[in-house]
Amino acid sequence: MKRILKMLPILLLMVLVSCKKKELKPEGFNITKYSIVGKLSNGYPYIITIESDKAVLTHYSATSGKYSFTDGVLNLNFNDEVICAFVVENGGIKSYKGPVILNTYDLVKIPSTNQLAGKNFKGTWNNSGSLTQLKFTGAEYIETTNNQQSIVDYTLINNLAVKKTEGNNLTVFILMNDKLEGGRYKSPNTFWGTFMRE
């Protein structure tokens, strides 16, 4: 019995050491699983996507750029036109340093499915008093304004935004805080609006 009691501390220590070896290290924060969404200072929406080799800023156009993510700081450079940095902490943006053109910003985890498919929205563009209705499917949206209907194929962005490019013209819709923010650049004019869920 005395021998068992002497061996007990050693056995407990061996169990503790083997448990520590099996503990997995927590995964580092993977910035490529997130997007940054927000509005420019004039109210126009934007989305920043972060891929393994580049970042893309989509607003009036889609601009590719470089990024680095070190010690919770995301540095972005979009062709020397927009250079900025976000401090990321606890899955959100703690602070921003850069041009005031980016008025709001929110770090959003990329959803696993298309968040617009099957949803309907209504609202108005900033330059129009006419109600616009938007109905989304998995591959297109139907836009109805003043009984004029158009069916538009779109490109999905990180399951929470869509874009349609026609020459130099670009339309983008981004889901932000349960609202659909729209932006449309039709050279030389820009339009934007907020669309609520029906």
Image: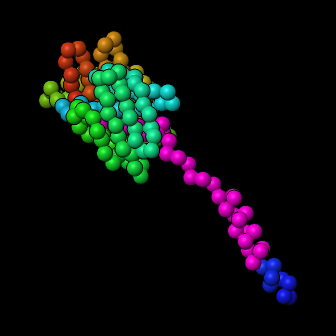
- Residue 161, image quadrant: top left
The count of marks equals 0
When the figure is inspected, residue 112 is found, relative to residue 56, above or below; the finding is below
Query: Is residue 180 visible in this depiction of the protein?
Result: no
Could you tell me which residue is drawn at 40 percent across and 50 percent down?
89
Instruction: Answer with the quarter of the image where residue 62 lies.
Output: top left
Residue 20 located within the stretch drawn in magenta: yes
Image position, residue 23 (x, y; %):
65, 58
Residue 52 versus residue 93 in the image, above or below: above
Q: Is residue 2 left or right of residue 149?
A: right
Q: Quadrant of the C terminus?
A: top left
Query: Toward the viewer: 182 or 35?
Result: 35
Q: Position of residue 177 (x, y in %)?
A: 31, 45
Front-lying residue, 57 or 168: 57
Toward the top, the furthest residue is 167
Q: Residue at x 21, y 25 (%)?
A: 191
Residue 106 placement: quadrant: top left
Which residue is painted at 29% across and 16% down in the image? 169
Q: Position of residue 163 (x, y in %)?
A: 37, 25
Q: In the image, which residues are magenta?
A: 9-38
Task: Give the vertical position of 24 relative to 48 (above or below).
Answer: below
Q: How is the image coloured?
A: rainbow
- Residue depicted at 67% across the width and 62% down the height: 20
Residue 141 rendering spot, x and y as whole percentages: 37, 27
Query: Is residue 63 covered in magenta?
Result: no
| Side (left or right) of 95 relative to 156 | left
In the figure, is residue 46 to the left or right of 159?
A: left
Instruction: Specify the quadrant that holds the N terminus.
Output: bottom right
From this viewpoint, is residue 52 visible? yes
